[in-house]
Image (tube, rainbow, N blue to C red):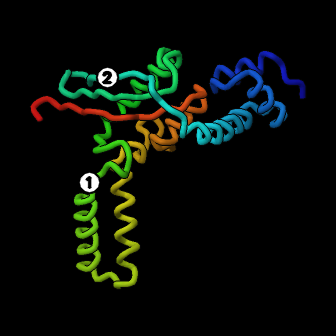
Amino acid sequence: MEITAQMVKELREKTGAGMMDCKKALTATRGDFDKAAEHLREQGIAKASSKEGRRTAEGAIATYVHTGDKLGVMVEINCETDFVARTDNFKAFSRDIAMHIAASSPLCVKRDELDEKLIGKEKDIYRQQAINEGKPEKIIDKIVDGKLEKCFAEVVLLEQPYVKDNDLTVEEFVKNMIASLGENIQIRRFARFRLGE
């Protein structure tokens, strides 16, 4: 099948990938648009992983105020260059992250930012629950670990299901944006404000 410039253009508009990458993906998938988009996504996530160690000194502070002005979020998101920080894609991404934080109430960005005392306390509670339920001693540690993982998915921003697409975690959403923009991106910190709290 012949890969036309129009096909490349449409795939580029849908995925944000470069023209040559789009052409290669369409060629590799014999013009199948959906498979080409999936191929680009897979390649992009691989590329995103290779950019994770790069320095992020630029970026923006994004805000989101929920309807009614009773809930607001500020989030610092960093990227490698001021050029990317000023793009509409980066600004929209930053606002989406702020909106997610407003909706999902995470406690921290990464798991290692959680207080060790809090984790220890949760482990003790889960262990006692398993004992009270009469679970065998040999599986209690697995039960505790499973409940702790579920807890992390609820309170750690990067591990939460992304509110606009529950098939993705926030971390996967960030990696997709890294692949799309071609720069490392990091959510540095956030503050969530609710009126009266």
Q: Quadrant of residue 148?
A: bottom left
**Location of residue 40 in the rendering, given as x and y in whole percent from the top left corner:** 69, 34
Residue at image coords 38%, 46%:
110
Residue at image coords 31%, 44%:
108
**Location of residue 19 in the rendering, given as x and y in whole percent from the top left corner:** 74, 21
**Location of residue 135 in the rendering, given as x and y in whole percent from the top left corner:** 33, 81
Is 132 rendered above or below residue 20?
Answer: below
Regarding residue 166, the answer to whether it shows in the image is: no
User: Disc 1 designates what residue?
Assistant: 115
Mark 2 or 1: in front is 1
In the picture, the quarter occupied by the N terminus is top right
Toward the viewer: 146 or 4?
A: 146
Whether residue 3 sits left or right of residue 136 in the image: it is right
Decide: few, some or many residues near mark 1? Use Cα within 10 Å; few <14, some 14-19, many ≥20: few
Three-letter residue code for mark 1 = Asp
Using the image, tell me which numbered label, if any, was put on residue 63. 2
Per the image, label 2 sits on a secondary structure element best described as: strand
Three-letter residue code for mark 2 = Thr
Q: CA distance from mark 2 to mark 1?
A: 26 Å
Per the image, label 1 sits on a secondary structure element best described as: loop
Residue at image coords 24%, 70%:
124
